[in-house]
Image (cartoon, helix red, strand yellow):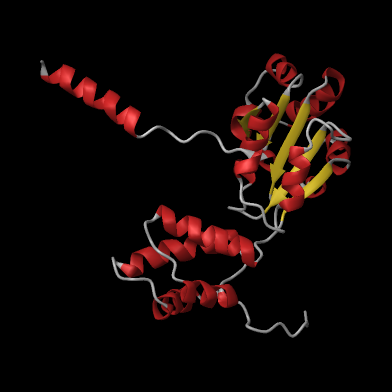
Amino acid sequence: MSEETGKSRRHRQLALDFPEAGPPTLDGLAVTPANRTALAVLKRWPDWRTHTLAIVGQPKSGLTTAARAWAEHAGGEVIAAKTFDKLSHKKVEALAGKPVAIDPADQVRNEDNLLSLINLSARLGGSVVLTGQKAPALWRVKQPDLASRLKAMTLVELAPPDDEMVSVRLHAAMKKRFLKLPEDVEAYLLLRIERNYAALETFVESLQEMAEGREVTVPLAREVLDDQDGTRPLFDDGED
């Protein structure tokens, strides 16, 4: 057997042993009060009152994952903003007849394409999901017709993480980095860590760097939080 043939067989074996993960599904996503309403609305497709829907949330809140899961559910596709900007009118018209998500839609620069997609999908029976960090009514667009369409869109939010979502995200991020999250460390963090998706990811990244193979402990977690200054008050006095 030649060396090249041996390598080819090994590559095939690796592909069988380590299959790629499939696309996310709406039923497979963790559900907490932070995202329950948004996911429920996505699952109700195609029984929507309108053909367009906007999903907003913080960076790292799972907007892309939600869009991909909905596209899998609806048999549609997700188009990146930069790709969508370059589409011809003919391709936009083809998209308008089926379920399509634009992610992140608040970064689309080709307003003609976005307005055409919204208008044509209403006529051709398609469905449009737009993702963004702010409500579409706050997006800076030049065309009055597009601004009007965006303001009229149904809006759902992936809210800032609640305690349950913080726990889910911490466990997922640490598992990805082969770290264990002891119960006492989790309890400590739930009282103190910032309610921000990006901050959670940054915390775990820093924790991995500082752990250097050591066990994760409360003192270590405290050290990482102090270094990031990413804590929240233990008690909210209710003042602005």
Decide if residue 25 is on the left or right side of residue 226: right
- The image quarter containing residue 9 is top left
Q: In this orientation, does residue 140 appear?
A: no
176 or 30, which lies in front? 30
Q: Is residue 6 visible?
A: yes
Looking at the image, residue 17 lies above or below residue 187: above
Q: Nearer the viewer, residue 69 or 135?
A: 69
Q: Is residue 29 left or right of residue 52?
A: left
Image coordinates of residue 114 in percent, x first then y, are 75, 30
Which corner quadrant holds the N terminus? top left
> Residue 62, image x and y in percent?
61, 48
Q: Residue at x 60, y 28 (%)?
A: 83
Q: Nearer the viewer, residue 236 or 15?
A: 15
Q: Is residue 155 above or below residue 217?
A: above
Residue drawn at x 29%, y 30% as measured from the top left: 14
Question: Which quadrant would the C terminus be assigned to in this image?
Answer: bottom right
Residue 112 x, y percent position in the rendering: 76, 27
x and y percentages locating residue 208 in the rendered image: 37, 63
Answer above or below: position of 86 versus 227.
above
> Residue sitting at 69 percent across and 42 percent down?
131
Q: How many marks?
A: 0
Q: Left or right? Give the position of 49 relative to 163.
A: right
